[in-house]
Amino acid sequence: MSEKENCQPENKPSSDALNSLLDQLMASKNILSELLINSEKVNNDFLLLVQEKRRMAIEHGIVKVAETLTLLAHGAKQCITARHRFKNLAMLDVESILFAGEAVPEEYYSCVFLDGNIMFGHDYIGFCCVPHTSPDKGNVTIGPFSGGDIPLDLVFSTRAKLRLDNNRPGCDTRCTGCPFLTKKNWRKKFAFDRLVLAHIALCNLRCSYCGVPTSSPQTYDVMPILNYLDKHGFLANDTYVEMAGGEPGLFKEFEEIMQFILKRKMFVQMASNATIYSESVKAALTEDRLTLCTSIDSGSRESFKRIRGKDLYDQVWENLGRYAAVNKRRVEPKYIIMDENSGEPELLGFVEKCVEKGMAHFVISRDVRKYRNSTLVENAFPEQLLNAVIFLAHEAAIRGLAFHFSHFTDKEMIKVRVEVIRKLMNKDLVRYQDLIKKIMEEIK
Ligand code: SF4
Ligand code: SF4
């Protein structure tokens, strides 16, 4: 303890007075979030004040108060230093004090979602919707949320606690066992560089496999939150935005969100049913800032209507064709293989429509609600459906269409590719040798 700290002030404030001071400080919301949000107010005067109060708390032996003020002083110092180095980045260092009250280590276990993502769900906010290993793992939520002010204090403290636990040897968390959890330098300049906007459950289709409660009314507005995060320097300029739902085109704020994204040069991954043509989507495709993924799951109007609940097959393809004319690399029709659409005529109908509408590639997926796992965990996928995938992939390959997989295991993907090669070789080795070579390279 320094000589100064040993000095007794002449008019010692009572512990009650100090406690009430701290209560006031805490009641002003949450000290740390106040610090984050009003970081411009964190100056040397503020630091001196906190240090003085801390000294008084130590003198009075009020340990809890002293500890909190130590944390606060540390954060304030970091804020001031950081501000000299970067504009708007003070909060990062403040957040770092939540890592066991110490500076964040150079390398630690985390993932892109925990250390950068915020997900707006229908009635909650969270970090990820990644399932892994067992039902009590993954899908990391922060808490219920139905609009209004974003509870940044809760977001940061939940993130810090989980991050800390993930780095404690032997500590079992929702992330334990997740393949995304890796050790590296996760420190970033901004609190968020990923956003998932899946807050609206509205949709104009009724797909047989849909897991979204599409009959719910629109829940909350997200633009005030985005503007707030942007204004206070929490969002990276190159934030990666995922839009899903529901049908994003039906979001009341859809145009506003798209303008926000386009203006800030962000990148969007949009899951949309493409029933509504949007000039903003076209503009984002033109700027190469959007990838559009649209499930078709059928090769005819009839099965589209049966599986997706409305007779909009032609309209969807018409819109996808217009989008692909602008940037076909970023338009991804999707085929979710199911019992009801795995017949050859359906699969052929889909591939031919892809060619007719100028697609460069498509995505083959599985019904994750029925065959639960994602690529993270192996599980049984019926042989006849895998054969349908092989048929679809082969028909695509001979037409020069690329295909990608979603929610398949490595083993399944390799099997499909090997079988496609086998079929190509049986057909005409010379004609397809370049294609075979390319698929072989993908397998490697
Ligand atoms: S469960 Fe996996 S993806 Fe989700 S936050 Fe944890 S490590 Fe990241
Ligand atoms: S388009 Fe998507 S949100 Fe709409 S019903 Fe189909 S699966 Fe559900």
Image: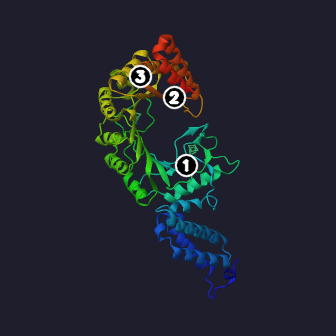
* Spatial separation of the CA atoms under disc 1 and disc 2: 27 Å
Q: How far apart are the alpha carbons under marks 2 and 3?
A: 31 Å
Place of residue 242 in the rendered image (x, y in percent of width and height, measured from the top left): 43, 43
* Residue highlighted by disc 3: 400
Q: Is mark 3 within 8 Å of ligand 2?
A: no
Q: Position of residue 65 (x, y in %)?
A: 62, 71
Does residue 114 appear in this view? yes
Please give the label number shown on residue 386: none
Against 13, residue 152 (above or below) is: above
Ligand 2 shows up in the quarter that is top left
Query: Which amino acid type corresponds to the residue marked 1 in the rendered image?
Result: Leu
Q: Which mark lies nearer to you, 1 or 3? A: 3
Neighbor class of circle 3 (other Cα within 10 Å; few <14, some 14-19, many 20+) is few
Residue 348 place in picture, x, y as percent: 40, 18
Q: Residue at x 43, y 61 (%)?
A: 232
Contact, mark 1 vs mark 3 (Cβ under 8 Å) = no
Which label lies toward us, 1 or 2? 1
Which of the 4 image quadrants contains residue 301? top left
Disc 3 secondary structure class: loop
Q: Which residue is mark 1?
A: 114
Badge 2 crowding class, 10 Å Cα cut-off, few under 14, some 14 to 19, many 20 or more, is few
Q: Is residue 124 positioned above or below 355 on the image?
A: below
Q: Nearer the viewer, residue 282 or 58?
A: 282
The mark nearer the N terminus, 1 or 2, is 1
